[in-house]
Image: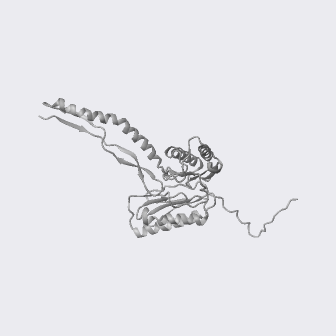
């Protein structure tokens, strides 16, 4: 009788990194994917005639899988840690802005700049635009936190983004990343990036896999909500250009838009409007959730949950008018 071998295999879910190539720097994002069973368990081996030959054939395969096991587990753990952070980044793979040498003046200026930005406790509205250095060693940096992220959480988010960017994009002069599901954005560059609307590349889109119902009404409600939020955000001041709200139509829709507040009102609205225009083209048409994320602005809508909290910073309003029947006056003191 022939020897019979029964193997029990296990399946793991491994977080892996997928690269999407485009004309712009590469977009990296993480997702969970099933992988091939990697660890066979030997339950039993019965044989009357060929027991030794069957075992001799099996042992090399078993040893191979056992040797690969620590490597597989290590890769899975590292990838899963990054996946929890929901981190998207671009490393200037076309090398338009060049690279710096470790321990160079540019490297020192970059480290000083990022440390200064993250340690700042005076800014409480979530927008940082700092520069450090001179001439070809000058570095510009922008940090932007989502409008509902408070100061301490904002700084933690930016610090985490800094650690990832300098590790994943070593020696690149121009880098940008969105950390913890767009709770914050951090970018740096040797070129002037303040007050410039950049709504092209790098850009990334994301969408729900679920289709909405009552599509005509749903798409109309999404468009109207995001346009209204865009007008409100664009009217903000140089500290905050952010708006979030919900609408009830065919179903509850939650929306959020934000610009870097160094843009003027028309630039902010234009950036967001162009993002909304992408919804039916290549973003998230007919889907119950979607987002378009750019260096100068981002927009997002969802139906599954309210993904934002109360505003972290509310600019003070104008002073109240004087009571009726009174005349304001000024006292001059010599």
Q: Is residue 63 above or below residue 229?
A: above
In the drawing, does residue 83 fall left or right of residue 184? left
Q: Nearer the viewer, residue 139 or 262?
A: 139
Q: Quadrant of the N terminus?
A: top left
Furthest residue to the top? 52
Q: Residue at left 51%, top 44%?
A: 170
Q: Is residue 198 visible to us here?
A: yes
Q: Give the image location of residue 211, x and y in percent.
A: 38, 62
Q: Give the image location of residue 253, x and y in percent.
A: 46, 62
Furthest residue to the right? 334
Q: Residue at left 45%, top 43%?
A: 81
Q: Quadrant of the C terminus?
A: bottom right
Q: Give the image location of residue 107, x and y in percent.
A: 59, 44
Q: Is residue 302 visible to us here?
A: no
Q: Residue at left 50%, top 59%?
A: 201
**Visual colour scheme:** one colour
Q: Give the image location of residue 112, x and y in percent.
A: 62, 44
Q: Residue at left 76%, top 70%?
A: 325
Q: Nearer the viewer, residue 221 or 61?
A: 61
Write down the quadrant of residue 262 in the picture: bottom right
Q: Nearer the viewer, residue 200 or 254?
A: 200
Furthest residue to the left? 1
In the drawing, does residue 106 fall left or right of residue 7? right
């Amino acid at each position: 009788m022939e020897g019979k071998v029964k193997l029990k295999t296990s399946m793991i879910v491994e977080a892996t990194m997928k690269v999407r190539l485009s004309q712009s720097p590469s977009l990296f994002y993480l997702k969970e994917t099933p992988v091939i069973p990697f660890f066979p368990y030997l339950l039993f081996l019965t044989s009357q005639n060929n027991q030794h030959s069957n075992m001799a054939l099996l042992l090399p395969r078993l040893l191979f899988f056992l040797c690969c096991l620590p490597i597989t587990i290590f890769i899975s753990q590292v990838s899963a840690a990054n996946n929890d952070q929901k981190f998207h980044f671009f490393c200037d793979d076309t090398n338009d802005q060049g690279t710096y040498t470790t321990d160079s003046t540019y490297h020192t200026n970059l480290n000083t700049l990022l440390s200064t930005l993250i340690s700042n406790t005076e800014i409480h509205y979530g927008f940082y635009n700092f520069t450090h250095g001179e001439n070809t060693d000058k570095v510009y940096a922008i940090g932007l936190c989502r409008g509902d992220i408070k100061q301490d959480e904002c700084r933690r988010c930016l610090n985490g983004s800094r650690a990832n960017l300098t590790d994943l994009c070593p020696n690149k002069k121009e880098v940008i990343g969105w950390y913890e599901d767009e709770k914050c954005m951090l970018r740096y560059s040797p070129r002037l990036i303040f007050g410039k609307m950049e709504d092209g590349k790098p850009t990334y889109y994301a969408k729900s896999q679920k289709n909405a119902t009552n599509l005509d009404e749903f798409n109309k409600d999404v468009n109207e909500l995001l346009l209204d939020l865009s007008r409100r955000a664009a009217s903000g001041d140089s500290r905050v250009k952010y708006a979030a709200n919900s609408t009830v139509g065919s179903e509850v829709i939650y929306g959020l838009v934000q610009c870097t507040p160094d843009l003027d009102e028309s630039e902010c609205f234009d950036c967001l409007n162009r993002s909304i225009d992408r919804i039916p083209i290549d973003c998230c048409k007919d889907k119950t959730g979607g987002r378009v994320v750019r260096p100068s602005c981002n927009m997002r809508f969802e139906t599954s949950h309210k993904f934002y909290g109360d505003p972290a910073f509310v600019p003070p309003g104008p002073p109240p008018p004087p009571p009726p029947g009174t005349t304001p006056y000024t006292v001059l003191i010599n």
